[in-house]
Image: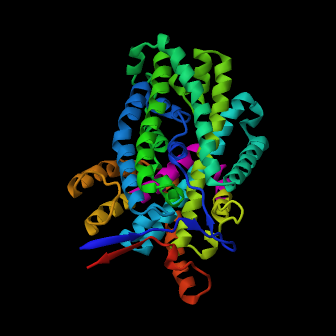
Amino acid sequence: MTSSVTTLPTTTAPAGGPIQTAKKLTLIPLIFLIYFEVAGGPYGEEPAVKAAGPFYAIIGFLVFPFIWSVPEALITAELCTAFPGNGGFVIWADRAFGPFWGSLMGWWKLLSGIINIAAFPALGVDYLEKLFPIFEGGYPRRLAVTCSTLFLSFLNYLGLTIVGYVAVILGVVSLLPFLIMSAIAIPKIKPKRWLNRGQHGVKKDWTLFFNTLFWNLNFWDNVSTLAGEVDKPQKTFPKALFAAVIFTCVAYIIPLLAVTGSISVDQNLWDTGFMATAAEMIAGKWLKIWLEIGAVLSAIGLFEAQLSSSAYQVLGMAELAILPKFFGKRSTIFNTPWVGILLSMIITIAMSFMEFEVIVASANFLYGLGMILEFSAFLWLRRKFPGMKRPYKVPLGLFGLTVMCLVPTGFLVLIMVIASRQVYLISGVMTVAGILWYFLMRLCKSKKWLKFMEDDGRVELENEG
């Protein structure tokens, strides 16, 4: 038995315009886009220390990448090279289990991604308010979040290649103050501070702890939705994912070791943004200001990378006929999916004013549902199409892959079990809406109320006897 894969063409045709040859992402910009899909620097890791103390925070950021990041990155590398088209995980679920599950996967991941995007303008303003207290709340804060969302969405419209090179610049500039802070902190480190398991009398908040770890180290598969825009994806994706995993994990653990080992402060001070305060304690106000500026730049990179992922996911879902043809429209000038960008931007603004912890928990829950489906699709495709061409293949048999997927799945279940009632309510309502959306789209197809793309935009998987 043999199988064949027909992939998307290398040219794209913006709706209403001539076919254009799209500029493709190369290795270095892709590494930094993945980095910003997942992390963007140590900004946002502070609540793990507040929740459980330095010891557990350090252990978490050392161990969690092996439980979660590595398996997710390996799966992404294999499936991106097997199905190098826009839509990523939506294509995988569709090919494994059919259009209903492809649609639900797209719904879960799109909402979780956009909820996640909504956190970044708020995170950037959290750091900015330390320089300009006017942004602490009220109308100035709301205006800052809204205007930054509008401006950054427009930047995304200018093109994925531009976003990729901007990500390289933002990554370097935003990480420099952490490298300097860590170097200055080395002589002040007292290793016994790393063993501090929490301040006496402070109750551990394991929900916040695990959600912080998960939020800071997930979304490795988001880059899969851009697979159709990558130069030589079969070779480029595995290299980029491998480099990004190492880069991201080192960028988290070194500053965490440096700060927790060099200063001793009230555990309750470790709110989001505390790294800036720590920089002032270690080196002076000049480094605090630099780090705060770096935090804003990092939030820009996070926003741009994840908005790109969401926009191209919308495009991919239109190509799979999960969404109407209109959602697949590209700009005739920049060849970018402007409808996907606009849709993501509108939802982002609507969600930008939720509480930060609720945003994180809701994104984690919906993402967890999607990841359980993704692990299942990965295993099923291995079983269903063992001879399918896979330019990169995880070097394990089906039993080993099952074990590899069960460990992070167990963590996902834990994240969902400890979720609040508010998160259950939000996630439940959104899931029901996604199911209703699928049947509404089926009705629209059967009645021809809306236009859908033909299957020429799909990645076709044929099983030949």
Left or right: where does residue 280 sit relative to residue 254? right
Q: Residue at x 73, y 39 (%)?
A: 137
Q: Position of residue 350 (x, y in %)?
A: 67, 56
Q: Residue at x 52, y 17 (%)?
A: 183
Question: How many numbered badges does the structure rendering display?
Answer: 0
**Residue in the foreground of this view, choosing between 381 and 388:** 388
Q: Is residue 275 visible?
A: no
Residue extending furthest toward the bottom: 447
Residue extending furthest toward the top: 187
Q: Is residue 274 visible?
A: yes
36 in magenta: no
Examine the residues drawn in magenta and state their main secondary structure: helix
Q: Residue at x 48, y 20 (%)?
A: 258
Q: Quadrant of the C terminus?
A: bottom left
357 in magenta: yes
Left or right: where does residue 345 sit relative to residue 225? right
**Residue in the foreground of this view, choosing between 238 and 429:** 238
Q: Quadrant of the N terminus?
A: bottom left
Q: Position of residue 101 (x, y in %)?
A: 42, 70
Vertical side of 450 occupied by 87: above or below = above
Q: Residue at x 53, y 27 (%)?
A: 268
Residue extending furthest toward the front: 21
> Toward which corner of the image does residue 125 lie, by quadrant?
top right
**Which stretch did the figure color magenta?**
347-371
**Residue in the foreground of this view, choosing between 370 and 56:** 370
Q: Position of residue 7 (x, y in %)?
A: 45, 68
Vertical side of 18 occupied by 405: above or below = above
Q: Position of residue 365 (x, y in %)?
A: 46, 53
Vertical side of 63 occupied by 289: above or below = above
Type of colouring: rainbow
